[in-house]
Amino acid sequence: MLFRSERFIVVCDTYFSADDFSLPVYRETVLLMYDLEGELINKEYIYEKPKEYHNHNYLLILNFGMKERIYDDELELVEEIKVKEECLGTFSYQFQGKAYINNLESEEINISYPGIYAIEIIDKDYQFVFTVVVHPDYRIEGKRFGEGYLGEVKIYSFGNLLLNQVQYVIGSSILEVGNYTLNIIGENGYRKDVEFVILPEIVVNDGLSETQLYANSEFMNPIRIFSNAQTMFLKDEVYSSSLINFPGNYTLVVYGINGYQAEIPFKIIPYVSGVENQEEYEQVEIEVFGNAFLNDEKLDSTALITIPGEYELKLMLDDEIYQTINFIILEEQETSIKEDTEIEIPKYVFLALALIGGLIILRKK
């Protein structure tokens, strides 16, 4: 009797006879374990004759009528036969005699189709019955992203497959964004439900580059948003990738099949160029992206400021102040110009007098 691939056990009943005319008398049963090279590994003596011998999933069962002995593949006694009640993918079972799977006779027990299976093994007077549940070893192929998949998805599994209650062909492409329920139907009323989601690919283009839109992303330029979702909504209106060109807080809502919905908040930030906080200028030219107030008066997108004084510029994000910039426009520098003039005039008068005085002295000589 073969045990797995590296060893086997031989059961020998030995007899002796007192003379040539008497019936042989049972002496003992010897269990001999050999490796595949024929070398004896282990042996066990039993001094009670078994009625039946059974090879049962790599177990040796010796039946003595009202009792039995069970040996494992190490030739160790075990208390009971243990079988898997559940398995993933494939269930195999080695036996001697006849096997019935869900009441149908089978030459082997090697099950790879998902289902619930009642198995009966019969060998002479020996009978062993058990039930096993074979779960599908299904595979979902696709680009995993967080709790879902991006892009194309394919499914491989044994069983009858229903995808959102529609027959699914193994290995065919699934492309639509949304929620999915895969039902794997097997033998004898078996069913397994698998839920997964195909997420939308959402890309932002700011005119220079493209990036993935993530929740709470911030942008400083007008943008366009593209997606493979069924529908997009922005500010409660259908959005179709038009230019979003004004600062504010936004929420993009995307929809897919079977009730899929996702909300992605993002913001476009206002900015100002040409002026910095707590600086002084003779004049400034300001360019604003968004809403702004200069000393509480609404400011156009560009402005040239030359009037001396203190200024407060408020950048707005929706109805709230996003940034405050204080700066000063200085008075014209007239004082320094007058001082320079007063210094230059006496200097030229002195030179003139010195020249006249020199001429007078020369004439006297």
Image: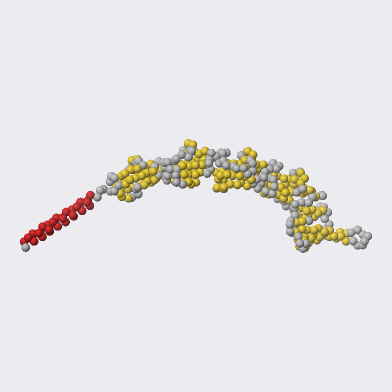
Residue at point 31% right, 50% down? 280
Extreme residue in the right direction:
21
Q: Residue 109: x, y in percent? A: 74, 48
Q: Is residue 197 left or right of residue 334?
A: right
The front one of 168 and 117 is: 168
Instruction: Find residue 197 and report its image quarter.
Output: top right
Q: Say if residue 164 shows up in the picture.
A: yes
Q: Residue 7: x, y in percent? A: 75, 59
Q: Say if residue 42 shows up in the picture.
A: no
Q: Residue 88: x, y in percent? A: 67, 49
**Which quadrant is the C terminus positioned in?**
bottom left
Extreme residue in the top direction:
237
User: Does 230 appear above or below 32?
Assistant: above
Residue at point 73% right, 51% down? 93
Colouring scheme, one of rainbow, by chain, secondary structure, one colour: secondary structure
Residue at point 70% right, 44% down? 116
Q: Residue 27: x, y in percent? A: 85, 60
**Which quadrant is the N terminus positioned in?**
bottom right
The front one of 118 and 238 is: 238
User: Does 276 appear above or below 10?
Assistant: above
Q: Is residue 249 left or right of residue 28?
A: left
Residue at point 57% right, 48% down? 144
